[in-house]
């Protein structure tokens, strides 16, 4: 497993593309366990007509299509589509029109077998916890919660701590906190226990994941057992209150 104890800020707009093993497929590596395997987070660009060999996702694949149209034998996914291909799924991407995607490999929570395909461009935004903030919950699996969050210009959120860490990809606009200014394409990883006071002067849309980063003094397994803490603890900073799993009919958040 990757060491995620350090804060990381990577402005992908300033990085060079690196050739992948497939012709016409380029990458920007954000974090990776090994050369071509293990836990990996990256931005990938498919030139028009480029594809990747058929492959199996040992522990899942999570994708947000940033531009163009991502495509495989299961469908055509325009910019804004959020995809989750669970463990054991296979596909052969072939992108006629070309695209750019943010992709996380081999990082699913134990037991997360749900296949997800959401065209976020066709979904409604819900009101967030403060004025100017809108949220679109995308997926929850145990301690991990993922959402798109839209900040109107001038929105200031509450100061908060991330007991289970936080990961952000800036999809559009400029996200800010007291430590910096993060333009479109920036990826941030805030470790468990970190805190900040985020805002956005110009407005932005961010993909946010919280709760999923383990810390030595608080292993994820203990929170997996104590699901009642999920709603008000590990999900801090998400922009909305995750429903208490005890109130769900099937007990799954
Ligand atoms: Fe894949
Ligand atoms: Fe946060």
Image (spheres, helix red, strand yellow):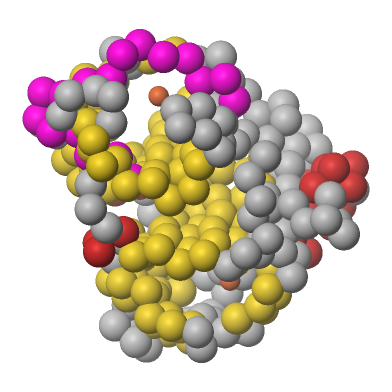
Image quadrant containing the N terminus: top right
Task: Where is residue 17? Give x, y as percent.
Answer: 23, 47
172 or 239, which lies in front? 172
The one of 3 and 239 positioned closer to us in this rendering: 3
Q: Does residue 246 sit above or below 92 in this rendering?
A: below
Residue 241 visible in the displayed image: no
Residue found at x 24% / y 23%: 22
Q: Is residue 42 visible?
A: yes
In magenta segment, residue 100: no
Determine which quarter of the picture holds residue 102. top left
Residue drawn at point x = 60 percent, y = 81 percent: 196
Q: Does 203 sit left or right of 128 as displayed?
A: left
Query: Left of 114 or right of it: where is 160?
Result: right
Indicate whether residue 52 is drawn in magenta. yes
Q: Quadrant of residue 173?
A: bottom left
Residues 153 and 143: in front is 143
Q: In the displayed structure, would residue 111 be above or below residue 101?
A: above
Residue 137 position within the rendered picture, expressed as x and y whole percent measured from the top left: 52, 52
Q: Magenta segment, which residues?
A: 43-59
What is the total number of numbered labels drawn onto the structure image?
0
The residue drawn where x is 46% and y is 44% is 41
- The image quadrant where one finds ligand 2 is bottom right
In the image, residue 149 above or below residue 52: below
Report the side of 52 relative to 146 (left or right): left
Q: Indicate the quadrant where residue 10 lies.
A: bottom left
Q: Residue at x 27, y 48 (%)?
A: 66
Image quadrant holding the C terminus, namely top right
The x and y percentages for residue 67 are: 21, 46
Query: Between 45 and 99, which is closer to the camera in this rendering?
Result: 45
Image location (x, y in percent) of residue 219: 84, 50
């Amino acid at each position: 497993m990757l060491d995620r104890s350090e804060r990381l800020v990577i402005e992908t707009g300033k990085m060079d593309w690196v050739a992948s093993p497939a012709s016409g497929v380029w990458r920007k590596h954000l974090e990776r366990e090994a050369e071509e395997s293990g836990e990996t987070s990256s931005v990938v660009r498919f030139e028009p007509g480029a594809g990747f060999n058929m492959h199996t996702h040992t522990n899942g694949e999570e994708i947000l299509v940033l531009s163009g149209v991502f495509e495989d034998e299961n469908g055509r996914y325009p910019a804004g589509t959020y995809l989750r291909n669970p463990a054991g799924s296979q596909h052969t991407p072939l992108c006629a029109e070309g695209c750019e995607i943010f992709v996380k490999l081999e990082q699913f929570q134990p037991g997360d077998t749900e296949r997800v395909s959401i065209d976020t461009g066709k979904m409604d935004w819900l009101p967030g916890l403060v004025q100017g903030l809108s949220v679109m919950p995308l997926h929850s699996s145990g301690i991990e919660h993922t959402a798109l969050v839209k900040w109107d210009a001038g929105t200031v959120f509450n100061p908060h701590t991330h007991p289970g860490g936080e990961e952000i990809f800036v999809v559009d606009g400029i996200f800010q906190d007291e430590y910096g200014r993060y333009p479109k394409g920036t990826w941030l990883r805030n470790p468990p226990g970190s805190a900040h006071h985020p805002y956005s002067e110009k407005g932005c849309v961010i993909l946010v994941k919280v709760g999923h980063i383990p810390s030595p003094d608080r292993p994820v397994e203990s929170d997996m057992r104590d699901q009642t803490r999920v709603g008000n603890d590990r999900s801090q900073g998400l922009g909305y209150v995750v429903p208490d799993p005890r109130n769900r009919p099937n007990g799954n958040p």
